Every structure is written in C-alpha cells, then in structure tokens.
Amino acid sequence: MRQNKSRSSVRMDMLHGGLLGKMLVFALPLAASSILQQLFNSVDVAVVGNFASSQALAAVGSNSSVISLMINLFVGISVGANVVIGNYIGQKDEKGIRNAVRTVSVIAISSGLLLLVLGLVISRPVLEMMDTPEDVIDLATLYLRIYFLGMPFMMIYNFGAAILRSMGDTKRPLYSLAFAGIVNTGLNLLLVIIFEMSVAGVAIATVVANIINAAVILYFLVHEEEPFRLELRDFSVSRPELRKMLQIGIPAGVQGMVFSFANVFIQAAINRFGSDAVAGSAAALNYEFYCYFVISAFSQAAVTFTSQNYGAGQIGRCKKIFRQSMLLSVVCCGALNVLLVWQKELFISFFTSSPEVAHYAAIRMRYVLLFQFVASSYEVSGATLRGLGYSMTPTILTIFGTCILRLLWVYTVNQRYNSFDVLMYVYPISWVITGAAVWFAYYMIRKKAFVLRSPAEWS
C-alpha cells in the first residue's frame, strides 16, 4: 500500500485546482532535466576546450545542428505520444493508455537502431557538405560516430520520459539525468585529462551516460502501476494509437528537422569564418540551449495540460493554460537571457581562454541570446495547438517563418555583407515573424477546436 501511494504521489492532477503552481512544479524539473541532458554536451565542450585544443572544441561544439537534424523527427513523435496518453488520461481510458505505452516502447527501440545506423553512415558526408574546416572535420566525424552508438539508449530515455510526463511526472526523469550527468562529468575528466583521449573520450562518456539514463527510466516504467506499466515481454504496436501519435508527432518532428536543416546552412556559413568562429559560436550556443529548454519546458507543460483538459472537455482551463504558460515562458526565459548576457565574459570563460574565440562567442550572445525569449511566442502557441490535436498548422508556419527566411538570409543578405554580426541578426528577426504568425493561428484555430472538442476530430 505504501509503495502504491509513493508511486501515485509523483503524478499530478491536471484537471482540477489551480494551474500556475502546478505548471511551475511540472515545468521546472523538466527544464532542469533538459539542461542536465545538454550538460552532457556542454561538459564535453568545456573539457576539450580547456584541456585539449580549439579544434577539438570546434569539433564537439559544432555538431549540435547535425545531431538535431537526425533525431528531431523522433523527438517530435515523442511529443505525439505525450499528447495521446495525456488525452486518454483526461478521458479515463485505461485500455488506450496501455496500448499507447506498448506502442511507444516499440517506436523507441526501432528509432534508436535506425539513428545508430544513419549516424555511422552519413556523419562525414554531412560535415563535408557543411564546409567543416579541414583541421576540424576528422575530429568532428569521430565524435559523431561514437555519439550515435548511444542513440538506442537516448531514444529509450526520451520516449520513456514522455510517458512519465504525460501523467505529470517530471521529477523522476530529472533524478535519472542528475545521476547520469555526474557519471558523464567524471568520465570526461578521466578520459580527457588522464588518458588524453580528447574528442573520443568525451563521446564515450556521453554514450555511457545515455546507457545509464535508459536503464534508470526502464526501471521506473517496469515498476510503474497499471495502466502505465511497461511489460518487457509484451512489445506490440496498436495501430490506432500509432496513427494518432504519428498524426501529432510527425509534423512536430518535421518542423524540428527542417528547423535544424536551416541551422545546418547557418552553421556552414559560420564555418567559412574559420575555426575560431566555429568554436566561439559553439560556446555561446550552449547558453542558447539552456534558455531554450526553459521555453521548451513551458511548451511541454502547455501541450500536456492542454491534452488532458481538452480530453476532459474543460475548455475554460485550456484557455487559461495557454495564457499562463506563455507568461511563464517569456518571464523566465527573458530573465535568464539578461543574466547570461550581462555576465557574458564570465560564462564564455568556462569554455575557452582564447580571445579570438571569446570575441565570436560575445557577438552571438549579444545578438541572439539576448532576444531568445521572443521564441516563446511560437513555441508555446504551437505546443498548445498540438495539445488540441492540430499539429500541421504550426509546422507549416514555422517552416516558412523561420526556416525558409533563414535560408534566404544566408544566401542573400549575408552573401552581400559577409559579416558574422549580420549572420546572427536572422535569429531575432525570424522569431518575431514566426511568433506573430503562429500566435494568430492559435486564436483562429482554437475556435473550431473548442466547438469540436472530440479527439476523433484531430487534424
């Protein structure tokens, strides 16, 4: 009895009571979890930047866009899993929850194996297409190939965490990441400083951390109460649940892939400024990830709370969820943006002691990081639409408003001025345009969604 009560205590009642406090309790551990996950890469970057070379720093830090390009489709599908399970919770449909959990387990294993093979095969060709500097490309290829050996375990963690988030549990994924993060940091220092393994050492440490994450999250799910328990002997796919997950998740994943595709071209433009620019951009990018995870946490809160309350037919709460998650995202991310830029010299020094590298990092922080809170406008609006079952519209608007605009900027404005500063301007400009479009779409579409209210009407 005590054990059942303990397990139930990590779940959250999203259908009753005040929202603001619950959204903070949900989002803050989720933000911390994502930051810890990014710390795997940040620690990699910091260790090689301080104990190896600038080329090793560039090799590790410049790979984020390539990694995102390959995994974002499946990250999007995990969002679809979150929405589907959350909606079933709102409807109190235990059979639907069981079918969804089994389906998620199959998707996790299949996607991880696919990404492993893909990463081993196309890592170097993609880096060559990005004009990665000659003194960086061999190290970058080595890092990527080792990194992708951990993909099956990363996908198990991501999809498993999506199941836990759907019931309001963001604490146990945080505990898992905290433990794995400590192991990752210790191995980084051991392999790079003691064994002088440079890029290979930090990649191996990240793979080990991902294995630990997967093992811990599987333990939680195998020992969870019904209907959320994962039965390791019962892997099967339920077609109705798979269809719903893909209906929501594929547009979200495609959006992330196209978004990363555009950033690959921006990274290629950065690469042309040399390894100092690549390393400086990589150092600053770590702080953009941290701030984005704050936005993402409140977006996840919006999609999870909305999916449950929409499934339960509580329209008034759905409206309130959007307003409060948007406010929290803008305020929390904006405060973090200002703090990091205010103390940029200190934060840059964690990654490099090179004045040339620090110069480029400061430019990126000044023109990109300071305005990142604006991205809340389309992230939270799009997440709320997905919680209502409408995933394609925010995808299309984000592709046009952000991705296509960035490509045009790289090949027109930046070609003319050939300036690192000018290249960075595209980020805040694209955030404003995309945010206005998706926010407007949310207010137009929600009228239809709230009238229909039925999960059968998802589109």
Image (tube, rainbow, N blue to C red):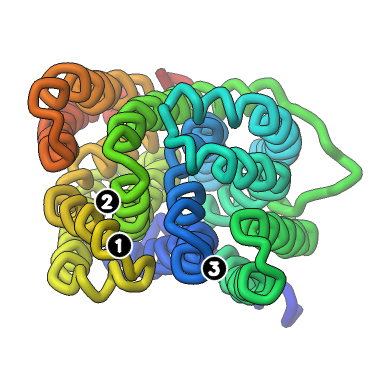
Quarter-of-image position of residue 406: top left
Tell which residue pokes out farthest to the right in this image.
233
Tell which residue pokes out farthest to the bottom in this image.
2
Which of the numbered marks, if any, corresponds to residue 19? 1
Cα–Cα gap, marks 3 and 1: 21 Å
Of the two numbered discs 3 and 1 on the same chain, state the one appearing first in sequence.
Answer: 1
Where residue 136 sits: x, y (%)?
Answer: 49, 43
Element marked by disc 1: loop
Rendered-image quadrant of the N terminus: bottom right
Q: Nearer the viewer, residue 445 or 279?
A: 279
Type of amino acid under label 2? Ile
Which residue is rendered at x = 30% and y = 19% of the image? 396
The image shows residue 220, relative to residue 438, as above or below, that is: below
Where residue 183 sits: x, y (%)?
Answer: 66, 73
Mark 3: few/some/many CA within 10 Å (<14, 14-19, 20+) = many
39 displayed left or right of 314: right
50 displayed left or right of 223: left
Rendered-image quadrant of the C terminus: top left
Using the rendered image of the protein, determine whether residue 89 is visible from the camera's viewpoint: yes
Type of amino acid under label 1? Leu
Which residue is rendered at x = 58% and y = 63% of the image? 173
Which residue is rendered at x = 72% and y = 60% of the image? 208
Q: Nearer the viewer, residue 192 or 212?
A: 192
Residue at image mark 3: 174
Where residue 217 sits: x, y (%)?
Answer: 69, 60
Q: Mark 1 and mark 2 in contact (Cβ < 8 Å)?
A: yes
Where residue 276 sits: x, y (%)?
Answer: 32, 50
Q: Nearer the viewer, residue 262 or 4?
A: 262
Of the two numbered discs 3 and 2 on the same chain, state the one appearing first in sequence.
Answer: 3
Residue at image mark 2: 321
Type of amino acid under label 3? Leu
The image shows residue 220, relative to residue 434, as above or below, that is: below
